[in-house]
Structures are given as C-alpha cells and as structure tokens.
Image (cartoon, grey):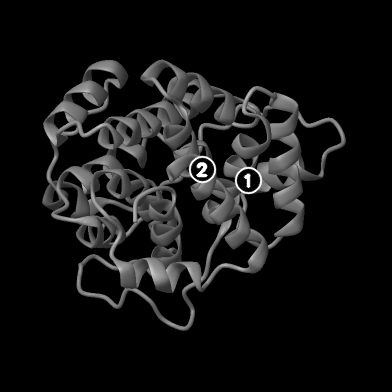
C-alpha cells in the first residue's frame, strides 16, 4: 500500500516518543499508547479538501477548522488553536512544521510538479504563511511527487538541495547526538528527508526518524509520507495504523484512496 497512509503510520508510531525521546532504532513500533495526533487529523483535513474542491481556499479553511474543532485535543500548537476558534481566521506567520506534516495528500492529487507545488503552497499559506513554512511544505510535496513518479533517491536529493537550499548530505550519525525537539520547518524538514534518503525501506525510515530524538510523531509523519511513495507500507504497519483511526478519519482515508490512488 502506498499513499498518505505513510504520514498516518509515521504519526501513530512516533506518538509514543514525542515527549519520550530515544536515540536508537530498537523500539516497538506500536503499543497500547500509540495514537493518532494532529499530524493525522490535519493530513486528512487536507485530503477532505482535495476530495471536495481543490480549487477553493474557502473549503480548505472550512476543513481545517472543522477537523480542528472535531478533534480539539489532538495536540495542536497554541496559535493554530486560536486560528481554529476564530470567526475570521487569517494566516499568522507561523514557520512551524505543521505545514509540512499535513501536505502529503497534494502530492497524490497533482498531475504535474507545478500543480503539486501550487496545491502545497495553498495548503500551507492559509495558516503557515512564513516563507520557511511554505518552503518546507513545498520541499516535502516535491519529494513525495518525485518518489511517486519513480525518481531515484539521488534525483530527489539533488532536486531538493538545488531548489530549496537544504543540505541533505549529513548522516544520521552526524545529526542524532545533538538533535533535540524542533518544531520549525527549517530545523526538522531537512532531517526528515534525510531519514528517508538513508532508509532501507518504509519501516527503517520511520525508525530513523524516531531515533533522532526530536518531535518524533511529526518527524516520522514527514519522513513516512515520502517513504510511502517510494516503497510499499508493510501490511502489518498498514493494518495496525488504520485500526487506530476512528470511523470519521478512516472514511476520509478510504474516500481519498478510492478517488485518487486506485
């Protein structure tokens, strides 16, 4: 299985380690405390927007607010919470990685790189309109789309480095010892992409992301969103992830897959 399940699985697996950082790759993928968080909720809000009307920014805002209110305790940042509750929501200049964690659906809908980039920019800027947040969303969407059309890792790396000026040449061993919780796009998106580039398969990518010891659920959601376009998500990971969604979120995932992936 490929698709936005990669972001969802990464989020759920990483949820146990968001505030319980580890610096190694030998950990159980799932436990009783593995849950979906804001990464999954907002990814599926973007998916629902694309299902209904990808041309409408008003529908996008409506979906983000609707799902934010439906799942008020999913783990949002304070400024996003205020935006969700506002009667007249306006972008608030955020540079955080919320734009990148939720962007994956656009890369499965856009038929060209240019369309993917346009949708990614729109998906980010209604809240996260800081240049670094838009850049992070674009970089992740580009990586997913390029993986989706069978680009090699080297081609993906070269494109992201040239277009977005991210340095993707570090090893995980370079990053891991001093890396800590970082919610900025600038301080998390390159690292998540490196986790994919250094991964041997989907599961290994997720283990790489969690092992950095940072914002584990978001780091793994971003890395997983790219990995799930390059490799198949293993059946067991897919099964255990979808069974942690409620019916509302699961039905959006199914509708999105039926409309855009099959």
Query: Foreground residue, 3 or 172?
Result: 3
Q: In terms of image quadrants, where is residue 155? A: top left
> Residue, x 47% and y 83% (percent of image)?
32
Q: Residues within 10 Å of mark 1 (few under 14, many from 20)?
A: many
Q: In terms of image quadrants, where is residue 138? A: top left
On screen, residue 167 above or below 76 = above
Q: Position of residue 249 (x, y in %)?
A: 62, 59
Q: Mark number for residue 102?
A: 2
Label 2 SS: loop
On screen, residue 245 above or below 95 = below
Name which of mark 2 and mark 1 comes first in the sequence. 1
On screen, residue 86 above or below 110 = below
On screen, residue 240 above or below 171 = below
Count of numbered tags: 2
Q: Is residue 175 left or right of residue 236?
A: left
Q: Can residue 19 be seen in this snapshot?
A: no
Q: Residue furthest front?
A: 262
> Residue, x 17% and y 52% (percent of image)?
199
Q: Can residue 5 be seen in this snapshot?
A: yes
Query: Foreground residue, 181 or 103?
Result: 103
Q: Position of residue 34 (x, y in %)?
A: 47, 74
Q: Is residue 89 left or right of residue 249?
A: right
Q: Mark number for residue 45?
A: 1
> Residue, x 59% and y 40% (percent of image)?
46
Query: Foreground residue, 245 or 219?
Result: 245
Q: CA distance from mark 2 to mark 1?
A: 8 Å
Q: In terms of image quadrants, where is residue 65? A: top right
For the residues bearing labels 2 and 1, Cβ distance under 8 angstroms: yes
């Amino acid at each position: 299985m490929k698709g936005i399940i990669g972001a969802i699985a990464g989020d759920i697996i990483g949820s146990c380690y968001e505030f319980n950082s580890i610096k190694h790759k030998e950990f159980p993928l799932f436990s009783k405390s593995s849950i979906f968080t804001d990464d999954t909720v907002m990814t599926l809000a973007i998916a629902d927007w694309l299902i209904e009307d990808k041309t409408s920014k008003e529908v996008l805002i409506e979906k983000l607010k609707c799902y934010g209110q439906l799942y008020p305790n999913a783990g949002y940042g304070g400024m996003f919470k205020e935006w969700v509750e506002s009667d007249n929501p306006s972008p608030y200049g955020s540079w955080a990685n919320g734009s990148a964690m939720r962007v994956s659906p656009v890369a499965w809908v856009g038929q060209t790189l240019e369309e993917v980039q346009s949708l990614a920019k729109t998906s980010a800027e209604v809240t996260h309109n800081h240049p670094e947040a838009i850049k992070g969303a674009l970089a992740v969407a580009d990586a997913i789309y390029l993986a989706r059309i069978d680009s090699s890792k080297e081609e993906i790396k070269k494109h992201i480095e040239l277009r977005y000026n991210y340095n993707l040449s570090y090893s995980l061993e370079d990053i891991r010892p001093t890396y800590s919780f970082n919610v900025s796009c600038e301080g998390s998106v390159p690292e998540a992409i490196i986790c994919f580039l250094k991964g041997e398969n989907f599961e290994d990518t997720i283990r790489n992301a969690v092992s950095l010891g940072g914002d584990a659920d978001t780091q793994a959601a971003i890395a997983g969103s790219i990995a799930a376009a390059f490799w198949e998500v293993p059946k067991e990971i897919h099964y255990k992830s979808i069974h942690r969604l409620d019916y509302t979120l699961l039905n959006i995932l199914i509708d999105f897959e039926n409309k855009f992936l099959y």
